[in-house]
């Protein structure tokens, strides 16, 4: 009897070990465990059968069954751990991130054409020894007008189509010229600065007008600065930016803050002086306004106008960018149309 039980148990043990070896994953092992050690499992059945043996055989039978039971429990646990570890390794391998894959490209921004042109222009003047200064877009009437020799009631004030904010005490600067005043108020001569910035006028937008646009202002004040310096600096600028053979001409003009005042024209880039639509048949393009700083402006900031003289100029960035890139409508600069803007990538 005991011998028959011993054989059956040996047989069961070998069979379970064979199944464990064949198991492919932890789920298979669990099935084997239930089939063997579960409530209706094969070994559990043997344990229950002990009660039906004659009393003298029971202790030995119980010992044999327990021996096999703990051996199988160990074997099952070991195989389960083995397979779970294998599965972990497999999942780690399968689900690992491939860090060598190229990333997904984000649409990259490009520099705005107005920023490109502004920096190019500033670079030319930096090489001539100018430093860069900026000022606020919301200005006082003093900086935008009075200090620039434009008193209340002066016709230039009306022509500027000024946008006022907070009553009449503050306004959106109509030009970058107030930065001249701020620089001179904050330091004594000599002064050699270029001042880029946004300016505002209550204009209705069309192909050549916008209620805001950009200017670069220039100012050089020192002892002995003459019209000769003005001509040298501005013609040199045209030659450096547009090429050494580009023709220039000065025309007399009027600005309240300069005396004498002038405008600098350059040979039309499209027709080289022949006359075309871009230059309205004249062969010339207006580039900037300029002049010798009016003594009243120097006095307004406390400079001694007997001792110091200077010249100044102001130019529109959009106009220069439109000529340079052949942009037909100023509004294109402000519409955030990426098809337009991407054309200026990596220039
Ligand atoms: N501020 C003038 C404007 O907005 C441009 C200008 C002309 C500036 C002559 C100057 C200058 O400094 O000397 O039209």
Image (cartoon, grey):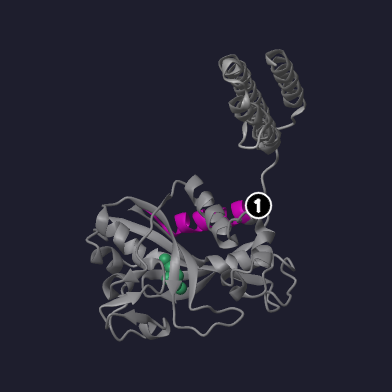
Residue 244 at what x, y percent from top left?
65, 52
- What is the chief secondary structure element of the magenta stretch? helix
> Vertical placement of 192 versus 315: above or below?
above
Magenta range? 224-241
Given residues 337 and 78, the one toward you in this image is 78
> Vertical placement of 6 versus 281: above or below?
above
Would the CB of label 1 be found within 8 Å of ligand 1? no
Looking at the image, which residue is at 73% across and 17% down?
4
Given residues 54 and 66, the one toward you in this image is 54
Q: Is residue 99 visible?
A: no
Number of numbered callouts drawn: 1
**152 left or right, relative to 31:** left
> Vertical placement of 4 versus 262: above or below?
above
Residue 98 placement: quadrant: top right
Looking at the image, which residue is at 59% across and 72% down?
335
Residue 311 at what x, y percent from top left?
40, 60
Q: Residues within 10 Å of mark 1 (few under 14, many from 20)?
A: few
Magenta run includes residue 305: no
Given residues 290 and 112, the one toward you in this image is 112
Q: Is residue 117 visible?
A: yes
Looking at the image, which residue is at 37% across and 72% down?
173
Residue 307 placement: quadrant: bottom left
Residue tagged by mark 1?
Answer: 244
Q: Quarter holding the N terminus? A: top right
Q: Secondary structure at mark 1?
A: loop
Quadrant location, ligand no. 1: bottom left
Residue 167 at what x, y percent from top left?
27, 83
Looking at the image, which residue is at 64% across and 25% down?
76
């Amino acid at each position: 009897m005991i011998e028959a039980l011993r054989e059956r148990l040996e047989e069961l043990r070998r069979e379970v070990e064979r199944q464990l070896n064949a198991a492919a994953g932890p789920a298979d092992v669990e099935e084997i465990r239930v089939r063997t050690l579960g409530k209706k499992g094969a070994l559990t059945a043997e344990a229950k059968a002990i009660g039906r043996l004659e009393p003298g055989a029971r202790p030995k039978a119980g010992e044999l069954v327990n021996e096999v039971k703990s051996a199988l429990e160990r074997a099952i646990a070991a195989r389960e751990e083995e397979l779970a570890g294998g599965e972990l390794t497999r999942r780690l391998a399968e689900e690992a991130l491939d860090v060598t894959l190229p990333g997904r490209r984000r649409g990259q921004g490009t520099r705005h054409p107005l920023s490109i042109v502004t920096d190019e222009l500033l670079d030319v003047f930096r090489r001539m020894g100018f430093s860069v200064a900026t000022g606020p877009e919301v200005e006082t009437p003093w900086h935008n007008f009075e200090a620039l020799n434009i008193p209340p009631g002066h016709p230039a004030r009306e022509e500027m189509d000024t946008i006022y904010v907070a009553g009449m005490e503050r306004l959106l600067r109509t030009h970058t010229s107030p930065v001249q005043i701020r620089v001179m108020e904050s330091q004594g001569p000599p002064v050699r600065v270029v001042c880029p910035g946004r300016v505002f006028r209550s204009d209705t937008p069309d192909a050549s007008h916008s209620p805001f646009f950009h200017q670069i202002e220039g100012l050089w004040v020192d002892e002995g600065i003459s019209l000769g310096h003005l001509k040298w600096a501005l013609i040199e600028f045209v030659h450096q930016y547009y090429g050494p053979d580009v023709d220039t001409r000065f025309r007399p003009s009027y600005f309240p803050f300069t005396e004498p005042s002038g405008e600098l024209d350059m040979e039309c880039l499209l027709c080289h002086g022949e006359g075309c639509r871009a230059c309205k048949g004249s062969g010339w393009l207006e580039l900037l306004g300029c002049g010798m700083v009016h003594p009243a402006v120097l006095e307004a900031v406390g400079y001694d106008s007997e001792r110091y003289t200077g010249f100044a100029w102001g130019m529109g960035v959009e106009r220069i960018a439109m000529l340079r890139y052949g942009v037909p409508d100023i509004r294109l600069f402000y519409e955030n149309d990426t098809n337009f803007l991407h054309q200026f990538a990596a220039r």
